[in-house]
Image (cartoon, grey):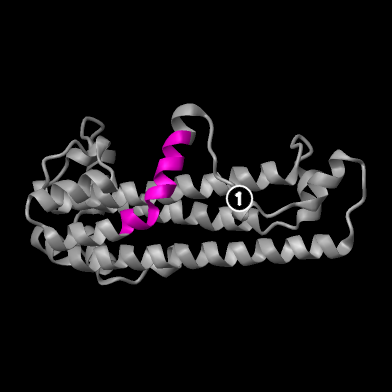
Amino acid sequence: MEEYLSGTQFELELAKASLKFVSKHMKECLENPDLVYEDCGTENEKKIKLILKLYGNISVVLRDIDLTFQFLEKERADILKHYSFLDSQESYFKYHYENYFIRIITVLDLLGKIGTVLYGLDLKLEKVSAYTFKDKAKKEGFNEISSIVEKITEKLNELKTERHKKLHTGEADIKPFNEIVIWEDINALIGSETDEILKEYTDEKIKEEITILRKSTLELIDLIKEFLEESNTKLKEII
């Protein structure tokens, strides 16, 4: 997922701008412990360093999402062998499914923070989400970027609702893979062996759902690229 996002003109411009002073600021801070890296440089340099940090965090979360896919694609026969503390395969898939949703929303919140810095919006950065950025940008007349973020938030509005429920109540109604029946879990309750045909059927259905999830993730990243392309002009204004 990280590779799919990389290579944008925004990323190139950000890297080129950062090379001009980031290493210099780091060296200065190493030589003088009283200096704070984030506070070094001009106001625009500080903004670029902040955007670089936020963009880097997006890359980290996208790597986490790649890892989550690896967990979802794990051989089902090995799940309870390797995670004997779990009572079912469903518990395993539900955990990683919810983890996927949480990380996706984290990416969007980071994007909202990048937008807030670029467009100079008067918002407390620690409280900014994609939603608050979208609304504020529209109010300030940045209709195009607000419209792009609206497309993203509409696509993931239901996921964000579930994420908040999970974080604030410790519960979530997210059902992994459209409630695909995991026959091994059911038969384990009644002490029965699972037919190989049923195992294969479940495997195929899970693979289908993972394919759909990957496709949705790439579509989301396409929208993020659209956001970055639209924001590139704003980035150039502070370089």
Nearest the viewer among 192 and 9 is 192
Name of the residue lying farthest toward the right: 192
Is residue 17 in sight in this rendering? yes
Nearest the viewer among 74 and 181 is 181
In this view, 23 is above or below 144 = above
- In reply to whether residue 36 is colored magenta, the answer given is no
Q: Residue visible at 40% across and 56% down?
A: 59
Identify the magenta region: 152-165
Residue 198 image position (x, y, % from top left): 82, 61
Main secondary-structure element of the magenta-colored stretch:
helix
Nearest the viewer among 116 and 53 is 116
Residue 122 sits in quarter: top left
Is residue 46 in sight in this rendering? no
Which residue is labeled 1 in the image? 176
- In reply to whether residue 164 is colored magenta, the answer given is yes
Name the quadrant of the C terminus. Answer: bottom left
Q: Residue visible at 26% across and 32% down?
A: 33
